[in-house]
Amino acid sequence: MWGPDGWKKVVVCVVSDGRSKINQRTLKVLNLMGCYQEGIAKDSVNGKDVTAHVFEYTSQVVVSDTGEVSTGACPVQIIFCLKEQNKKKLNSHRWFFNAFGPQIKPNVCILLDVGTKPTGTSIYELWKCFDSHANVGGACGEICVDTGKACSLLLKSPLAASQNFEYKMSNVLDKPLESVFGYISVLPGAFSAYRYKALQNGPNGKGPLASYFKGEAMHGDGANGAGLFERNMYLAEDRILCFEIVVKKKEGWVLKYVKSAKASTDVPTTIAEFISQRRRWLNGSLFAALHATVYMFRIWTSGQNFFRKIILQFEFIYNAVQLFFTWTALANFYLAFYFLYIAVLFVVTVCSLGNRPQGSKITYGVAIILFGICNVVTLWCAGYTVYAAAPKTAQEWSQFGHLLMTNPAFRDIVISLAATYGLYFFSSILHAEPWHMFTSFLQYMFLLPSYVNILMMYAMCNLHDVSWGTKGDNGAAKDLGGAKKVANKDGQDVYEVELPSQREDVDSVWAASKAALRNKPAEEKQHRDAATKQSDHDRNSRTNTVLAWVGTNMIMILVFTSPSFQLWAQKFGNGTFNPYLTFLFYALAGLSAIRFFGSTLYLVLRLCGL
């Protein structure tokens, strides 16, 4: 398949979102490769505005970051689409899937975001998964944090280290588990792949791509009749796409995780950027998960075999339990912590309702430190409780089983710690990737309460903000001239376009591009636009949802800390521990056990070549 002419089976399509937003170094590199030429693009053709400028070329030129050019490399077929306006990511994907896709008729489409760097064979490893398994409709690799030279970023930024741990544990526990089931809740848009056939809509026009692009018309000035729930749900359009592929009617597609395909990406290193990024992630994932849970019955109308339907139904139930704990995370943290909690949470709530993260950096920073102290104190108490009750002599160790049976508090804490942190270590060692446990674990534990209490609070208090963020310019600069329609001597319509025709003009542009790449420009900071005015309806819906969320958690807190419940606990729970916390510990231990089982089974199936 990949012989001397194998390059003809690969097309690289570069879609740039906005001519005024493109990095000028990108244009210079493409110019040196022969994929772009200044002076060709026009603002209008026959009086109609141009929406995109498309260049096509097969290049054998390799350009280094300093502008050095070498030729004779393996040919690469390239389509470069330079959009005139900044229209967001979904519009760029629409250009590929709906405009170029029907012309190219691809088999496998691999999506790669700017700023995400795959390792040498990762793209091949993703393609190989589709070649080996005919029923794979989508696949993803491991997204890891770009930690810099010698992991320097982990030492400089606890926030980056925390995200590194989060990413790693997701790739060690969650993605393998979901891959074994056959349904990965989200294939990261930064580095994922789809079988083009699995994406196609049905004869009625409904299907994965129709659902994927549905959210494009729900944002901006008009919501197209959609409610706030639906508009937030389509912030996680990649989750909707994954769900639609797996439940596609009368077809049996599965989604896979390919551990050997890795790609590194940049992560936020400031509190304001981090909170703003997670606002869209959390809101989108929460409502997309609700959508998948409500419509889980659609799996029974898909073309999956009966055994796969049973497995997927179990996964949907497992995801529903996870969703419950996500919704009640505030109450669970309060019941586990108490200390400092209400005062700090009140401050975060007030900031979330009115302030942008960029304007409250100090307040959020102090809140993160205080929440971190809460976790440190709680973990120290748990650790000291285990130490105080743990056997000290060989004779006491021989009675360890009896101790677990007679001391419920000690037993519950030991099981809870072992089922979470113990499995973190053990599963990471099984996957031969234990390093994040030593470089990022402490930072993650310190920031863990902030993931729930700050990120969730900010996300829920800003449900009315359903923007992706266009990073500035949405207009089109009219500076290229136009193509005019004229009649030739035979009476046929032709278009007259001014192009650079002198060779010295073309060569001078090429030489200028090469020279410009020798000096790397200073990094420019992105300036965020002010938040746009939101409608009263969206704000009211936001308020109702926040009240329902906070109210649910407050009811749990009132019930499980009430004197009546304490009396009941003393009477029926041996008076030594809060029965709800016992339930919480065992529930989380059970979920962790399922994640560990799926992660281990993924390794076994991978070793067997399945």
Image (spheres, helix red, strand yellow):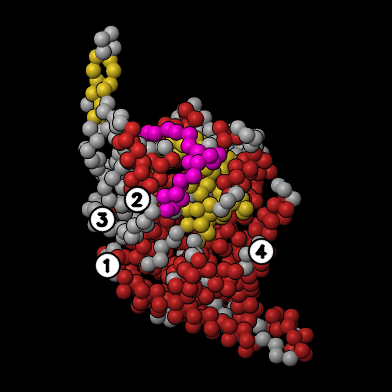
Q: Label 3 is placed on what type of residue? A: Asp
Q: In this rendering, is residue 144 above or below 304?
A: below
Residue neighbourhood size for the residue with mark 2, other residues' Cα within 10 Å, grouped as few (<14), some (14–19), many (≥20): some
Residue neighbourhood size for the residue with mark 1, other residues' Cα within 10 Å, grouped as few (<14), some (14–19), many (≥20): few
Q: Label 4 is placed on what type of residue? A: Ala
Closer to the chain start, of discs 2 and 4, is 4
Closer to the chain start, of discs 1 and 4, is 1
Residue 439: image quadrant is bottom right
Q: Nearer the viewer, residue 317 or 197?
A: 197
Residue sitting at x 27%, y 51%: 472
Residue 282: image quadrant is bottom left
State which region is magenta.
Answer: 48-74
Q: Determine the CA span between mark 3 and mark 2.
A: 30 Å
Q: Nearer the viewer, residue 474 or 283?
A: 474
Q: Secondary structure at mark 3?
A: loop
Q: Which residue is mark 1?
A: 359
The percent position of residue 45, horizontal first and vertical second, equals: 26, 27
Tell me, for residue 516, which label it has, or none.
Answer: 2
